[in-house]
Amino acid sequence: MPQGTLEVLLVCAKGLENTDFLNNMDPYVILICRSQEQKSSVASGKGTEPEWNENFVFTISDSISELTLKIMDSDAGSADDFVGEANIPLEPLFMEGSLPPAAYNVVKDEEFRGEIRVGLTFTPEVRSERDFHEEEESYGGWKESAI
């Protein structure tokens, strides 16, 4: 399984369901990558078309197959409302190295609730075993010294 760094560019969302009846909602995103969790800023009063343009970095060290984005509506004085979520498979990213910002479906109760636009970059970790092996070769091995 790949190990390295996952960079997430959280761009924007559109067509989200408005969970606030009187005002525009104040959406934010919780980004979940296995046990790691990060939170975007709140797009105050941005309603169903929020923009964030924020970067997040996760360390990939074990078998992670997807990134989950939970979209929430920040509510003062009461619990935040769940707007929907998007699950982004990471296998294509591991093969390509980077995926330009693209729209992913936001789903709630198995129904389409809008789109979220995200760009992804994966930087593989250089293994220390390989570094040691390359170093050993550059100094010459037993074949060269036998001449």
Image (spheres, rainbow, N blue to C red):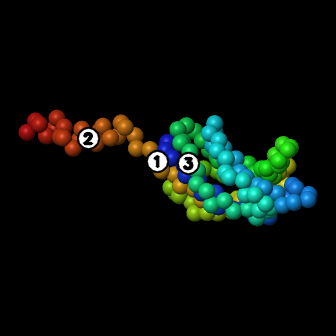
Looking at marks 2 and 1 on the same chain, the residue that comes earlier in the sequence is marked by 1
Residue 37 is situated, as x and y percent measured from the top left of the image, at 65, 41
Return the residue nearer the eye: 74 or 12. 74
The residue where tag 2 is placed is: 135
Q: Is residue 118 in sight in this rendering?
A: no
Q: Secondary structure at mark 1?
A: strand
Q: Secondary structure at mark 2?
A: helix
Residue at image x 46%, y 47%? Answer: 124
Q: Residue at x 29, y 38 (%)?
A: 133
The numbered mark, 3 or 2, whose residue comes first in the sequence reads: 3
**Is residue 142 visible to the viewer in this orientation of the structure?**
yes
**Mark on residue 57?**
3
Q: Residue at the front extreme?
A: 77
Quadrant hosting residue 24 = bottom right
Residue 66 or residue 85, whichever sits in front = 85
Which residue occupies the foreground of this view, 77 or 84? 77
Query: Few, some or many C-alpha atoms within 10 Å of disc 3 (few <14, some 14-19, many ≥20)?
Result: some
* Picture quadrant where residue 18 is located: bottom right
Of marks 3 and 1, which one's residue comes earlier in the chain? Answer: 3
Q: Position of residue 106 (x, y in %)?
A: 76, 56
* Three-letter code, disc 2: Glu
SS for dot 3:
strand
Crowding around mark 1 (Cα neighbors within 10 Å: few <14, some 14 to 19, many 20+) is: some
- Label 2 vs label 1: CA separation? 20 Å
